[in-house]
């Protein structure tokens, strides 16, 4: 299976240890020994890729309303840490270029999940992929691009065909193989909860690595690895010890 990335991926940067999709989260993942992080990227109104999961600001920041209706400078001025804990107060909403610089500095591999707001699928795919190609130019390991939006992934492929893409599903559809071939996707990222044995068998037979989210249980992780899953995304950064993992060390 061609999976050049680590087996353990810190979900949303720092899982449960830090406010999601912040630079503090990336640092937290790195501190815990993770060598790869996943984070979500959405466009601001002025088309700047920012780390953000929800289309609305309320859950993870001091802002209100839609992310796509605020310029990057306004988003950067919000507090994306206080909701999680006072020690993170003042943590800004980072731009993708800041996250990329930190990942490269810390030696963290990245899964950039393209998370378009509704109606911005093509634009987000294009801008995020083009910027990612520049930001990781010359990197030993390119960022893995993924998205629930097939439209965004097609656009990513059009502007940065050299960057690896993963299909991303909650429930994997029956026709995923055809899509994977047409898209030239190198991996299948899917929910551990819905992963079917026949899907994994098909992927394995075709040499396509499968990465599962979100796995927070050691026993489940062991079962998935034993079954042939290549990597997992976790929020339980303190439960796993990737630095001690023979394959991740
Ligand atoms: O990319 C894997 C996982 O992050 C997908 O779900 O909602 O946490 O972005 P979500
Ligand atoms: Mg995500």
Image (spheres, rainbow, N blue to C red):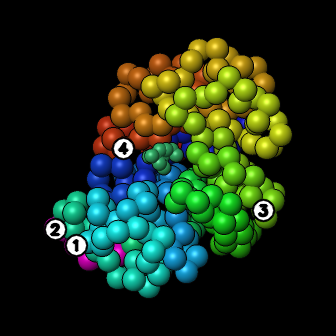
User: Contact (CB < 8 A) between labels 2 and 1?
Assistant: yes
Which residue is situated farthest in the front direction here? 119
Q: Tell me the tag on residue 178.
A: none
> How many residues crowd mark 4 within 10 Å: few (<14), some (14–19), many (20+)?
many
- The answer to whether 75 appears left or right of 192 in the picture is left
Q: Which residue is mark 3?
A: 160
Q: Which residue is mark 4?
A: 235
**Residue at the spot 78% in from the left edge and 55% down from the top edge:** 157
Region rendered in magenta: 86-92
- Name the element at disc 3: loop
Q: In what element is the residue under mark 4?
A: loop
- Is residue 36 located in the magenta-colored stretch of the structure? no
Q: Which residue is mark 2?
A: 86
Name which residue lies at 45% across and 74% down: 69
Cα separation, mark 1 vs mark 4, equals 21 Å
Q: How much space separates mark 4 and mark 3, taking CA atoms? A: 29 Å
Distance between the alpha carbons at the discs numbered 3 and 2? 40 Å
Of the two numbered discs 3 and 2 in the rendering, the one whose residue sits closer to the viewer: 3
Q: Position of residue 64 (x, y in %)?
A: 30, 70
SS of the residue under disc 1:
loop
Side of 248 where 74 appears, left or right: left
User: Do the residues bearing badges 1 and 4 touch, measured as CB atoms within 8 Å?
Assistant: no
Disc with the residue nearer the chain's start (1 vs 4) = 1
Residue at 78% across / 62% down in the picture?
A: 160
Mark number, residue 89: 1
Q: Earlier in the sequence, mark 4 or mark 3?
A: 3
Q: Earlier in the sequence, mark 3 or mark 2?
A: 2
Quarter holding the N terminus is top right
């Amino acid at each position: 299976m061609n999976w050049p990335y680590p087996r353990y991926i810190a979900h949303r940067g720092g899982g449960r240890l830090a406010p999601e999709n912040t630079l503090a989260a990336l640092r937290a993942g790195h501190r815990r020994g993770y060598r790869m992080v996943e984070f979500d990227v959405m466009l601001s109104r002025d088309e700047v890729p920012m780390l953000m999961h929800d289309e609305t600001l309320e859950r993870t920041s001091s802002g209100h309303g839609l992310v796509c209706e605020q310029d990057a400078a306004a988003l950067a001025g919000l507090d994306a840490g206080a909701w999680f804990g006072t020690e993170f107060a003042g943590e800004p909403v980072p731009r993708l270029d800041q996250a990329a610089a930190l990942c490269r500095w810390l030696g963290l591999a990245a899964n950039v999940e393209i998370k378009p707001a509704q109606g911005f699928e093509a634009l987000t795919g294009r801008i995020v992929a083009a910027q990612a190609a520049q930001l990781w130019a010359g990197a030993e390991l390119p960022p893995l691009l993924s998205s629930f939006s097939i439209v965004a992934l097609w656009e990513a492929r059009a502007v940065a065909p050299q960057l690896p893409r993963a299909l991303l599903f909650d429930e994997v559809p029956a026709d995923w193989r055809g899509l994977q071939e047409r898209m030239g996707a190198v991996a299948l990222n899917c929910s551990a909860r819905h992963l079917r044995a026949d899907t994994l068998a098909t992927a394995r037979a075709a040499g396509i690595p499968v990465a599962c989210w979100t796995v927070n249980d050691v026993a489940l992780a062991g079962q998935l690895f034993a079954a042939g899953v290549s990597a997992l995304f976790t929020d339980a950064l303190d439960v796993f010890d990737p630095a001690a993992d023979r394959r991740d060390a």
